[in-house]
Image (spheres, rainbow, N blue to C red):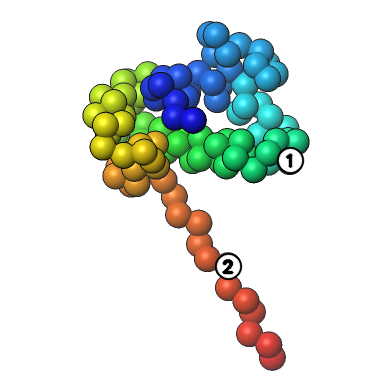
Amino acid sequence: MRAPSVVAMWKEWCGLEEFEGVPIEGGIDALEKQGGTKWRSGYIGAMQKRFSKRKMIITAISNAKSVRGDDTIEKTISALEEDYKNAANESNLVEIYLVKKYGYHEKKKRKTKNPAT
C-alpha cells in the first residue's frame, strides 16, 4: 500500500497527530527502539515488508536532513513531498525510487564468509 504522502509516512512512523498512540505512544519508531524488528513477527510477510520499506524511507528522510543542511525535519519533508507526488505518476515503487534517486539511504555491506583456515 502506497502512502499518500511523505508527511503521512513520517507521522505514522513517529506516532504524531492522527497516529498518536498507534500502535503505542511514540509510534512505530518506539516499537523499533524497544525490540528491533522482533515486533514485526506477528504480521504477515507483506506487512513486514511494508514496515521494512518504511523504515528505509524514514532513515532516508533523516539522512536527507543532514545532507541538505535543513534546520528542521519539516523543511526536508516538504522538499521531498513535491518529488514524491511527481514520481507517484511514474513508478509503482515511488517510495524506493525517491530514496535511491536522492542517495539518502545507506546500503548495507554484503556479509562475507570467513575463509576456512
Q: Where 1 sits versus 67, above or below?
A: above
* Residue at 34%, 46% in the rendered image: 100
Q: Amino acid at mark 2?
A: Lys
Q: Are marks 1 and 2 in contact (CB under 8 Å)?
A: no
* Residue 8 quadrant: top left
Q: Amino acid at mark 1?
A: Ser
Label 2, secondary structure: give it. Answer: loop
Disc 1 to disc 2, how far (Cα)? 23 Å
Residue 3 showing in the rendered view: yes
* Residue at 62%, 76% in the rendered image: 113
* Residue at 58%, 17% in the rendered image: 15
Judged left or right of residue 44, residue 70 is: left
Label 1, secondary structure: give it. Answer: helix
Residue lying at the far top of the rendered structure? 17
Residue 83 showing in the rendered view: no
Is the residue marked by circle 1 packed among few (<14), some (14-19), or many (20+) residues within 10 Å? few
Disc marking residue 111: 2
Q: Where 3 sits versus 67, above or below?
A: above
Percent x, y for residue 13?
55, 25
Q: Which residue is mark 1?
A: 41
* Residue 47 quadrant: top right
Percent x, y for residue 18?
55, 8
Q: Nearer the viewer, residue 114 or 28?
A: 28
* Residue at 75%, 36% in the rendered image: 42
On-image quarter of the C terminus: bottom right
Percent x, y for residue 76?
33, 26
Q: Nearer the viewer, residue 51 or 80?
A: 51
